[in-house]
Image (cartoon, rainbow, N blue to C red):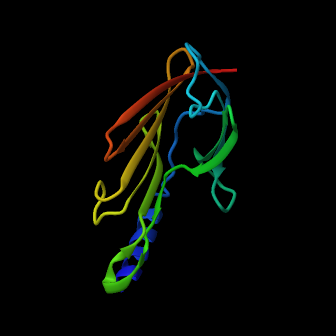
């Protein structure tokens, strides 16, 4: 019964989060400003595509909004590609083990607009509530400055403490 309730709650959260949202267009090829040698975990280039929706399912015009974003991150070791639905909140809950205890971590993710900033949030935890047990949180915020540069601020938090990395990319 508890598992069914969690699934229903997750579906309700996802359904309520599918609202049309407008925002900034980050589409393009972006190169990292390199004041020094970058960390191997930092992408040196980004290729970004955003899907703009301007008609509803019946083909009628509507207020345009960015539906999703595809990001190809280029690292020294290779390229990683990911696509995110904008305005969608989701996650994964573990199954139940012996005596009704959960088995495995809980995961959550969201991509949403905060004014003109695009926010990617994700995390996991093994305790009974967030920030308990083995846990980690990651928040990546994208903004454009007046000169057209892309600012990416990545904040990670865990039991080991917080870490923030600020990156600046120029459109190529």
Q: Residue at x 34, y 37 (%)?
A: 162
* Foreground pick, 72 / 110: 72
Where is residue 101 drawn, in percent x and y? 33, 78
Point out the image quarter for the C terminus. Answer: top right
Q: Position of residue 72 (x, y in %)?
A: 67, 39
Q: Name the residue located 36 percent from the left edge and 75 percent from the top edge.
A: 102
Taking 102 as reference, is 30 left or right? Answer: right
> Is 103 situated above or below 21?
below
Task: Give the total number of marks visible in the rendering.
Answer: 0
Q: Position of residue 134 (x, y in %)?
A: 35, 56
Identity of the residue drawn at 46% across and 52% down? 110
Observer able to see residue 64 = no
Residue 170 in sight in this render: yes
- Residue 32, compared with residue 83, is above or below; it is above
Which residue is at 33% across, 43% downward?
160
Kindly indicate the quadrant of the structure image that contains residue 71: top right
Classify 133 as above or below 12. above
Q: Quadrant of residue 75?
A: top right
Pick whichever, 117 or 105, lies toward us: 105
Quadrant occupied by the N terminus: bottom left
In the image, residue 33 lies at what x, y percent? 59, 17
């Amino acid at each position: 019964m508890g598992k069914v309730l969690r699934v229903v709650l997750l579906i309700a959260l996802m359904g309520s989060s599918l609202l049309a949202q407008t925002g900034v267009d980050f589409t393009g090829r972006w190169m990292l400003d390199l004041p020094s040698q970058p960390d191997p975990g930092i992408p040196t280039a980004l290729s970004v595509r955003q899907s703009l929706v301007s008609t509803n399912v019946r083909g009628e015009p509507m207020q345009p909004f960015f539906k999703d974003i595809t990001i190809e991150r280029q690292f020294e070791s290779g390229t990683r590609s990911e696509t995110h639905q904008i305005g969608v909140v989701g996650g994964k809950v573990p199954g139940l083990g012996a005596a009704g205890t959960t088995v495995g971590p809980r995961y959550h993710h969201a991509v949403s607009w905060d004014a003109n900033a695009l926010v990617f949030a994700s995390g996991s935890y093994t305790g009974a509530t967030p920030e308990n047990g083995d846990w980690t949180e990651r928040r990546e915020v994208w903004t454009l400055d007046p000169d057209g540069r892309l600012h990416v601020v990545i904040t990670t938090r865990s039991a080991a403490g917080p870490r923030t990395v600020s990156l600046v990319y120029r459109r190529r």
